Amino acid sequence: MRRSLIRWSLFLLAAAVFSLPLVSWAQLTKADLDSRLKMESHVGNITGHAKDGAADYHRYCEGCHGVRGDGNGEVAQWFDPPNFPKPRDFQLGIFKCRSTPTGTLPTDQDLYDAISRGFDRSGMPIWNTFTKQERVDLVAWVKHFSPRFVSEKPGTAIQIPPEPEVTAERVKAGREVFARVQCWKCHGVTGEANGPSASTLQDDLGRPIAAFNFTEGSRPKCGDTDQDIYRIFMTGLDGTPMPSFADNIKPDEAWDLVFYLRSLMREPSKEKAIAQQLGLKPVDPNAPAPTQ
Amino acid sequence: MRIDTQSRLFRNPLSLRYPLTAALIVVFVILSGSQRANALPAFARKYGLRCSACHESWPQLNNFGLKFRDNGYQLMNDHDAPIWQNPSYWPVTFRITPIWHRLSVNQNVDTYAGGVQTGTNSAIDRISSSGFDLSGLDFHTGGTLEKNISFYVLPSSDPTGAFHFETVMGRLDNLFGSPWLNIKFGRFELNNLLSEKRTLFLTGNGGIYQTYHFIPVGDGNIFGQMGDNQLGLEYVGHSVDDRTRISASLLSSSDGNVNLIMGANSYSEFFTFDQAFDAGKLGVQRLGAYAFVGQAATYYKTSGGVPIPGSGIGNKGFSREGFYGQFYFGPHFDLNVVTQHGQDNAWFGQGYGNPIATNGNGAATCTAAPCPPNNFPGTALPVGAQAPSWNGVTFEARYVYSPQLIFLAVYETERMSQQANGSGYTVGFTGPNGLTGPSASNLGNISNYTIGYRYNPFMTSRAGFAWHNEFNIFHQQGTGPASPISGLSTNLTVSELLLGFDFDF
């Protein structure tokens, strides 16, 4: 009887000793968890709270983005890159569509816009049926998955100068920029996403990724206004091979490039009409690289 | 380091703070051990979304699902066109529901003594029966034929396997690039905000909305049933975010019956409008109104005394109008309200309107008494006959504990405000509607209560499976068995307890 008691005591003691590190770990993670669960987001005058977004995330988002926000939801296995990209891994804290410089966190407004706008050429629908408050709450919940949002501040949104008047000179100049920064290597000389590098593109996680095809009529991923297109190549799409050209293209040149890209798109536009009037030919990949 | 923060909020079994959660986890573990169905629900498979994205609980739509439907089963992205689908994609979902249920109803029975029948319908008894049973089988197939051209076909069988086409329609959506221009053509469910075809209830009286089907006792108008799929053409318009929705339908007054068996030239119109409001953390609130205005035949020409299908003339009018309300109180609780004021022409009130006994697929003229009356030339309404009218309301509340567990309750009441046999009706005279003398003011009033819950042990984009439990009590004034003493009709009470598996695959 006494022997049995001693044996049990030893067992419980051993269990307690081995549990100590777990208790310590739990305490550490609890503090981290608490701070993340208290995550807030601010869009306009609306404040979102992470916990309030949990139920909607569970219902609408978890199937793709996963319980842990790691992009490994139950249906993620059916997504087939590059035509159907895998869901975003929120834990990484890396987002394509931002108004902030490359490498920085997006603003709450950026995440809110992504939810409201959805993404063409992906499984992400347009979630504009939520109330604004529900979307802002979801932004906070999305942020809580990544420790980056605890330790870092979002970047400062880039300044977009006023859009100049579209002219033939600007469209032509945009073509020069398109050639100089070698957009054609991925997007192709006609914008059909068939450049020499297109088939080799991978995202940061090593998954195949497709360059944007300007000619097929899809919406650009991060918005389809001229300002959105300007923003895309000045901030880059983090996590993808699309870099930021903020150091290579001056703001005025950036507008020229926007106009030229518009001329490649399928939809009728003033830029497209100008390009046709000018008889603008696709860039020549074998021409000597123009200097800045 | 990756941390499962979600588990802390929802799934940490160590917390055991919520005994219900713990119990559900056990049930979940047991049931999720079952093998998943291999075939796939149509739309969820196409877009890779879970059921819960579009359904509050399948098949009831949430706001996102409503927008998806209003867009012609499109998410309005570049994956809507079928060219994006895997060649093996086949947009079909099967639904069938094996159940156990217990039915109980009061009715007249014959009496016996010493093994010999001593009376016919001379007593009232409560007939209760229980056992395993089956629902019909639905084949849902729908999707896009091309961007902005969609279809939906639903062959549906009753439990014996007799099929009919519940829904058959083509849609042209976003005409001229506008979400305000969409056309639907065929046999379809009316644009009811509270959809009966998507109800979460399965019992005989709980599975339909009484407000959508109410007909006064003895009334011959079967054509004003908003809950039935109708044949016609529908215009639908909506804002991009689906906050504002309008519709107008032109329908054959046939209650969805095919083969032109009813009126020779009878049409109805159905109009809806609803507007949603952004209410912050409470969610999207929606208010709307509808009107169903129509005409249907009361006189069918005869051949050898038998009504000729499709010959109906002598159109008389009817109307149903009311309000919708859809109120969310946060992500877990919502309340739906539908009101109705209905009115039928006095001829319908006297039982005229449908001498063609139908089975949903075609004509089968009445062959056994009592056949509905026919408004032959020269027929006059009985003295005191008047247009019946009534008011009704449906309250449906849902508590969504999680997308996988939902609690449901419905209360409906229908109250006559004017009987077809008015106070001027000759006392003791039995009218063509089979009712004698002036009717009691509450004759035909309905109270209907249903409660239940649905539990989905798993939720994927590949199949739907729910454990369903429901109880319904239906009560109607004056339509029950005749009293053996007074000979007057008593009240009808029907109850049903149902348990079953509701699954689609």
Image (cartoon, helix red, strand yellow):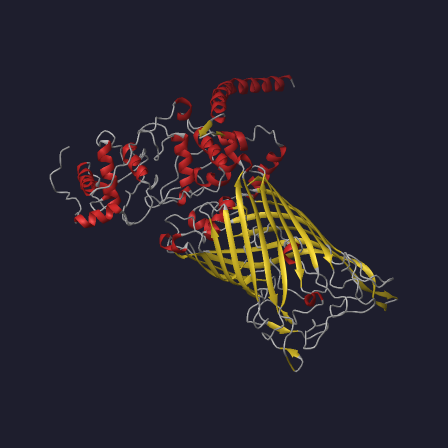
In the rendered image, the residue lying farthest to the bottom is: B304
Q: Position of residue A223 (x, y in %)?
A: 35, 40
Residue placed farthest to the left in the image? A288
Q: Say left or right for B399 vs A108.
A: right
Image side of residue A229 versus residue A26, left or right: left
Q: In the rendered view, would you say B216 is above or below A204?
A: below
Write down the quadrant of residue B159 in the picture. Answer: bottom right
- For the point 68% across and 66% down, the residue is B348
Query: Camera-side residue: A8 or B70?
Result: B70
Q: Does the image show residue B317?
A: yes
Toward which corner of the image does residue B96 lie, by quadrant?
bottom right
Q: Residue B367 location in percent, x, y? A: 68, 75
Q: Which residue is drawn at 76% across and 64% down?
A: B421
For residue B61, say whether it is visible: no
The residue lying at 54 percent from left, 38 percent from top is B283
- Number of labelled discs? 0
Q: Position of residue B340 (x, y in %)?
A: 64, 53
Left-right relation of B190 to A283: right
Quadrant (top left/top right/bottom left/bottom right) for the C terminus of chain A:
top left
Q: Position of residue B276 (x, y in %)?
A: 53, 44
Where's the N terminus of chain A, which quadrant? top right
Q: In which quarter of the image is residue A255?
A: top left
B166 up-or-down from A230: above or below: below
